[in-house]
Image (spheres, rainbow, N blue to C red):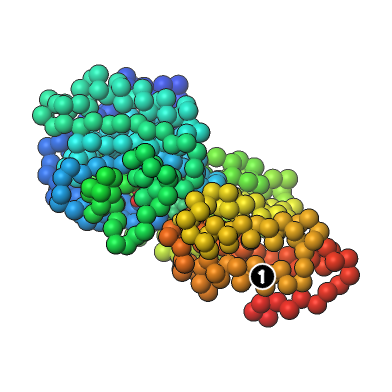
Amino acid sequence: MNQTRVLFKRMTDHPADSHTIDRYLETGGYEQARVALGRTRDELVELVKTSGLIGRGGAGFSAGMKWSFLAPARPAYLVVNGDESEPGTFKDRQLLERDPHQMVEGMIIAAVANEVHEAFVYIRGEYPKPARRVQQAVADAYERGFLGRDVMGTGYHLDITVHLGAGAYICGEETALLNSLEGRRGEPRLKPPFFPAAKGLYMLPTIVNNVETISNLPHIVERGIEWYRGLGHDVDTGTFLFSVSGHVKKPGNYELPHGITWRQLIYDVAGGIRDDNELKAWVPGGASAPWFVPSEHLDLEITKSVTDSSGSMLGSGAVIVMDETTDMVAAAERLVRFFAEESCGQCTPCREGTTWLDMILRRMLDGGGRAVDLDLLYDVSDNISVGVGWPPKQTTICPLGPSAVSAVKSLLEYFRPEAEAHIVRANRVPVTIKGFGQ
Ligand SMILES: Cc1cc2nc3c(=O)[nH]c(=O)nc-3n(C[C@H](O)[C@H](O)[C@H](O)COP(=O)(O)O)c2cc1C
Ligand code: SF4
């Protein structure tokens, strides 16, 4: 199955120097920024709204809609989220490293659309090479007059600051990111009452968008709404970057249209399962997403609406594939441990609950599992995310706590006998397990 290369086109055609300003200019670069500078805020917001561009950072919110909510107070800020810490996600890295000018041009367009003169790129600290490339791109853009006090001779003023995080997953959550940018602890703020579009950086109106979201903008300005919508599927417009990892023969980043099936993605695009093993399950949209299983989900279309209504999410586009050799208790424990380690600690259900979930799963793996443990897993999950349903109802400030529940919920829903077998083995004699929901 062929990829539809839009965001990845330049780096595919010119792998050696797609990150340089010379190659960018030679392939039409910064022409769309010039077009945007000649348009009004209303025109650009309407263009992006009608294009159907959905944020690619995980929450899946309309980019144009978010822009239209920006409060009128000025100054306002633009922050590009390049924290990319969701396990399994590595597409922004490729965009930052291989085509940084595409994002910088997207930032100029977003800045003009939102009447912003001060923008930031927040990059995770573990991405030194992408960060160096973005810093170079920003420096080159200043030198050639695409940034600064007189952008392209139009009198428009735009400064971009590149900021490196220090390696905390929670700083990808937009309000924690803003706190981190301000020099505070990276802890999420309570939303509502205030969303960043009303009170964000320094309590001023702020647009936070993901790297991939922003990188789409030059293409939408250049080729228009019809073309962009035509690439996609119903309401899921444009292409989508999938980071496929795990037990597939060809892991990697793939740019594809929405609407293909999971079977096509895993078998045709990613080459099928290693050693021709059986597919056991996959995480469809980053570690926070509930798992999918072949018996129920393999032939579903990959669209936001179908994935949402099937009990999971496309999230950040990270697809983690697990074959028949995977111990699902071990898989759940690994994911839960990540969230337990990354909890910022503000909310008790998240701070304590994720740690307890991890301890219970670990004792099951270590041979100390008890008959009550599966009920206990559910009970602790219920304290973090009431009803353990989807979409999650959270008792916490941000969705990190409920994200840990996704793996536990999936384990109990699809692999309960396997989890019970761990406990039976641990007790060396068969035990009767009074299971939740049985
Ligand atoms: C725990 C957590 C981690 C997140 N990490 C990221 C991230 O690394 N990158 C990102 O773009 N969005 C991340 N998000 C989503 C952001 O809060 C925000 O919705 C997004 O940056 C908005 O951009 P978009 O509308 O273009 O998707 C995270 C959210 C949560 C709750
Ligand atoms: S849910 Fe977890 S990560 Fe989010 S604010 Fe609460 S303690 Fe922090």
Looking at the image, residue 78 lies above or below residue 161: below
User: Residue at (32%, 47%) from the top-left corner?
Assistant: 208
Dot 1 crowding, Cα within 10 Å, few <14, some 14–19, many 20+: some
Residue 67: image location, x then y, percent: 23, 51
Comparing 215 with 230, the one in front is: 215
Ligand 2 within 8 Å of the CB at mark 1 = no
Residue 43: image location, x then y, percent: 14, 48
Residue 9: image location, x then y, percent: 40, 34
State the residue position of label 1.
376
Is residue 358 among what the camera can see? yes
Q: What's the residue type where badge 1 is placed? A: Leu
Comparing 15 with 82, the one in front is: 82
User: Residue at (34%, 60%) from the top-left corner?
Assistant: 191
Is residue 51 among what the camera can see? no
- Image quadrant holding the C terminus, namely bottom right
Looking at the image, residue 303 lies above or below residue 221: below
**Residue 372 occupies quadrant:** bottom right
- In this rendering, position of residue 36 left or right of residue 385: left
Comparing 39 with 372, the one in front is: 372
- In this rendering, position of residue 396 left or right of residue 436: left
**Residue 222 occupies quadrant:** top left
Looking at the image, residue 397 lies above or below residue 273: below
Name the residue at the bottom extreme: 438
- In this rendering, position of residue 203 left or right of residue 133: left
Comparing 28 with 139, the one in front is: 139
User: Residue at (64%, 79%) from the top-left corner?
Assistant: 437
User: Residue at (30%, 21%) from the top-left corner?
Assistant: 140
